[in-house]
Amino acid sequence: MANILGNGGGQPQPPKIDLKDAKELKCQDCGGSIFIEGTKFLKVSKLLTGQPQDAIMPIPVYLCGDCGEICEELLPKEFQKQK
């Protein structure tokens, strides 16, 4: 079997990123930069799902490790406050 050199598999290579050029994400309320993963749960009516019971949807959220506020920038677009 032949050796595959380079990007012969057809998959795109991720760009090379120098982390020194990246901007640290900060809490919009207190400026903290450490976030803790949490989960918000939404209940969806059985009338909307067509199922015999209401459905529970987990939504991942990230909380500031200093003040506990949810980081708006990391929320799914449907839950972000309109600017």
Image: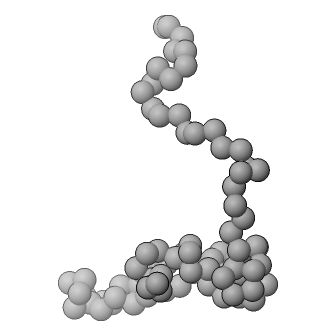
Residue 51 placement (x, y as % from top left) = 24, 84
Give the camera-side residue of 24 and 8.
24
Position of 76 compared to 32: left or right?
Answer: left
**Image height of 81 relative to 4, above or below:** below
Q: Quadrant of residue 55?
A: bottom left
Q: Position of residue 20 (x, y in %)?
A: 76, 50
State the count of labels: 0
- The answer to whether one can see residue 65 in this image is no
Q: Residue at x 56, y 73 (%)?
A: 74
Indicate left or right for 56 with 25 as reference: left
Q: Position of residue 36 (x, y in %)?
A: 70, 76
Is any part of residue 34 visible from this angle? Answer: yes
Q: Is residue 67 left or right of residue 10?
A: right
Q: Residue furthest top?
A: 2
Q: Nearer the viewer, residue 37 or 65?
A: 65
User: In this picture, is 70 found above or below 25?
Assistant: below
Q: How is the image coloured?
A: one colour
Would residue 11 appear left or right of 61 to someone viewing this image?
left
Whether residue 25 is situated above or below residue 66 in the rendered picture:
above
Location of residue 22 by image quarter:
bottom right
The residue lying toward the viewer, choosing from 39 and 61, is 61
Residue drawn 69% across and 87% down? 29
Residue 26 picture quarter: bottom right
